[in-house]
Image (tube, rainbow, N blue to C red):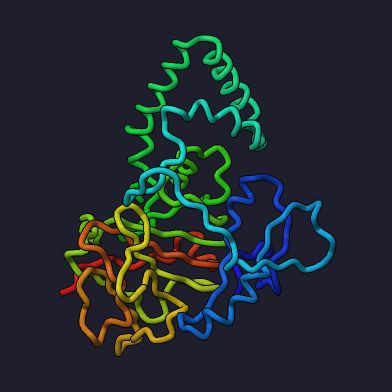
Amino acid sequence: MVGPNWNGKAPDGISGTFRSSAELAAFCPRVLLNDIAEDRQAIQPILNQIMVYPVDQFDGKMKTKDWKKVPSFPVPGPQGSEEIRWVPPETFFDQLPGILDKVPPLPGEETTYTLVRSILDAAAKDPQVKQTLKETAAAADKDLIIPLLQWKLNGPPAGNGWYSPTNNGDFAADYIIRTAIARSNMYENRFNETKYIFTDNDSDGKQLNGGITYSVTFPAGQTPPVDGFWSLTLYNEHHFFNPNPLKRFSLGTKNQDLQKNPDGSLTLYAGAKSPGKDKETNWLPAPNTPFSLYIRCYWPRQEAINASWMPPKVERHG
């Protein structure tokens, strides 16, 4: 299964054109595999066929690229445990004119662009205006942007303590959610291609923490409703993968060895401590610090899109 799909049908391959950088940014194809070495090797030729290039380079012939040979670019400056800050707030308005030149306004945004450019022009002429912009950007980053890392600010409630955007990849003028996604998650497909559901908290509203083991139980026949595939991913407090000896960061359709309960339900576990040898196939190792959980539904069915399907509670285990 290759995702995303643009036509509501299982595609034979991926092709299409992008009308804007926003559409290109939302292009996040996925290739389903079983989580075994043989499948990881088998999908390489398929991955090499996933390409993005300018339309004027299209010659009617299939293009491929050996993605294993893509060069690695070192991250500038000191590296910490948090996301690299490529745009410090103090230089935001210095870089903004170039971004506006490269990213054309969406329909209806022309007036907003004109207003922003008028402010930038004023700052270029008056040092006091520029200083005010710097101070405003720093204050906004601290008071408005940094808190958006919280999943509860990334979309409306989806039930049982989970949250989910309803317009991902199609934000229009919803700048709050658009900014929240950029802060906490960066790229998302359109809502009809992928349904994203996330939480920082357990069923009691308390922050998830690796010192506690949690369980997430999908009743029989009620795993995430998809025509593609689904996964439950665990992230650390900075929304990055948690390194662990099992090298396991998500569980879902790809894991053929998941153990179901006698009644057909499926229980997945999350925590720093193993839930027991007999349950380890269903375990997501967590750090000994706060963490979050994230459900992805690729090619979601209508009940996932309209939220009539509700994700299960995240409960303390034992």
Residue 228 placed where, x, y %?
A: 55, 73
Residue at 28 percent of width and 71 percent of height: 285
Residue 26 placed where, x, y %?
A: 58, 53
Name, please, the residue furthest toward the left.
318
Q: Nearer the viewer, residue 155 or 110?
A: 110
Q: Nearer the viewer, residue 306 or 154?
A: 154
Residue at 37 percent of width and 33 percent of height: 141
82 to 223, vertically: above or below: above
Is residue 294 rendered to the left or right of residue 70?
left
Name, please, the residue furthest toward the bottom.
262
Residue 274 placed where, x, y %?
A: 22, 77
312 to 80, vertically: above or below: below
Residue 31 placed where, x, y %?
A: 57, 72
Residue at 52 percent of width and 15 percent of height: 123
Total marks drawn? 0
Is residue 23 rendered to the left or right of residue 234?
right
| The C terminus: image quadrant | bottom left
| The N terminus: image quadrant | bottom right
Residue at 84 percent of width and 64 percent of height: 60
Residue 198 figure quarter: bottom left
146 to 291, vertically: above or below: above
Is residue 280 rendered to the left or right of residue 240?
left
Residue 152 visible from this viewpoint: no
Residue 193 visible from this viewpoint: yes
